Image (spheres, rainbow, N blue to C red):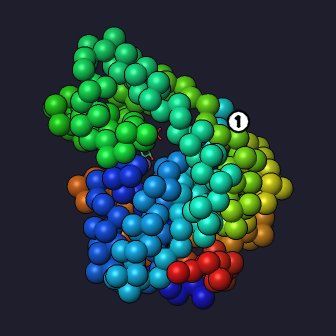
Amino acid sequence: MSILNADLHCHSVVSDGTLTPEELAARAASNGVELWSLTDHDEIGGQHRAAAAARAQGLRYLTGTEISVTFAGETVHIVGLGFDPADEGMRQGLEQTRGGRGGRAREIAAGLATAGIPGTYEGALKYVGNPALISRTHFARYLVETGVCKDTAEVFRRYLTEGKPGYVPHRWAALKDAVRWIREAGGVAVIAHPARYKFTANEEYALFTEFKAHGGRAVEVVTGSHTVAEYARYADTAREFGLAASRGSDFHSPGESHTDLGQLPFLPAELTPVWDLLADRIQ
Ligand code: AMP
Ligand code: MN
Ligand code: MN
Ligand code: MN
């Protein structure tokens, strides 16, 4: 059933969002969301709170996470939905994936210091809700607070993306491992916001082909980081590869995110919604 206000992608203070799981559940409910998932980066520490808050709000809930993966030299995000959060393989895989973030953050700060901006490691830490999950977003918030840039988009453009002084190359999880952790924990793997990757047509084809071969089953079609033309494009890709489709705002913060929870268009009616694959995992 495509006509369901499902929002299966957002972030809390457990990763790089600014709201608690409880605040997100309340916001989702008041925006009319019917099925929700909290998908913190490389982390499931918020799942118990999110599921309990969803229950309190009368929202249906799927467990979630967004795993950082390195594929063809680029960072790709794989959302996992409906897995068992107690699964040991999943827990260990995520712990390993986020393990490099502390050292990477020190290197980001060193790069920014070279560009004449000192003290950013300590500054970013003020915005971190989970010490195991320091992200570029926390640096971006600090650089906005201190007036170095006017918004986080400018920080990424000038300082935190490839070729810029605070950019640190990093090797995240392998695609096949991320998909396997999700699958073996009983969940469904979803390629997040595919239009955001700087892949050639061949590389993108390889991503979808390998994802599918590893047991991945869905792709985000309607997301806060796609244009309307990109909804149509990835609806075609979903059909071409026989993948189900997902819908999620990728909401991070009231001040920063241009797409709020539950406000996107519905999925195109002819696609199989990812929640149809997860009917028995909905809480
Ligand atoms: P990290 O996992 O530390 O590399 O941080 C990635 C996060 O940074 C993403 O999940 C987004 O929340 C945020 N991000 C990435 N690119 C941008 C951008 N151009 N503008 C604003 N936020 C961004
Ligand atoms: Mn993020
Ligand atoms: Mn992402
Ligand atoms: Mn996200």
Front residue of 36/242: it is 36
Q: Residue at x 78, y 64 (%)?
A: 241
Could you tell me which secondary element the residue under label 1 belongs to?
loop
Front residue of 233/133: it is 133
Q: Is residue 168 left or right of residue 137?
A: right
- Taking 157 as reference, is 196 above or below it? below
- Taking 176 as reference, is 161 above or below it? above
Q: Residues within 10 Å of mark 1 (few under 14, many from 20)?
A: few
- Taking 167 as reference, is 172 above or below it? below
**Residue 280 visible, this orientation:** yes
Front residue of 94/36: it is 94
**Residue 155 visible, this orientation:** no
Quadrant of the frame with the N terminus: bottom right
Counting the numbered discs, the total is 1
Q: Is residue 241 left or right of residue 227?
A: right
Q: Is residue 175 left or right of residue 55?
A: right
The amino acid at mark 1 is Ala
What x and y, as percent, mark residue 133? 42, 41
- Taking 116 as reference, is 231 above or below it? below
Q: Is mark 1 within 8 Å of ligand 3?
A: no
What x and y, as percent, mark residue 99? 53, 35
Q: Residue at x 42, y 59 (%)?
A: 46
What x and y, as percent, mark residue 78? 61, 53
Badge 1 is on which residue?
Answer: 72
Quadrant of the rendered image holding ligand 1: top left
Q: Residue at x 50, y 51 (%)?
A: 43
What x and y, as percent, mark residue 108? 40, 23
Q: Residue at x 53, y 81 (%)?
A: 283
Q: Is residue 164 left or right of residue 217?
A: left
In the figure, residue 245 lies in which quadrant? bottom right
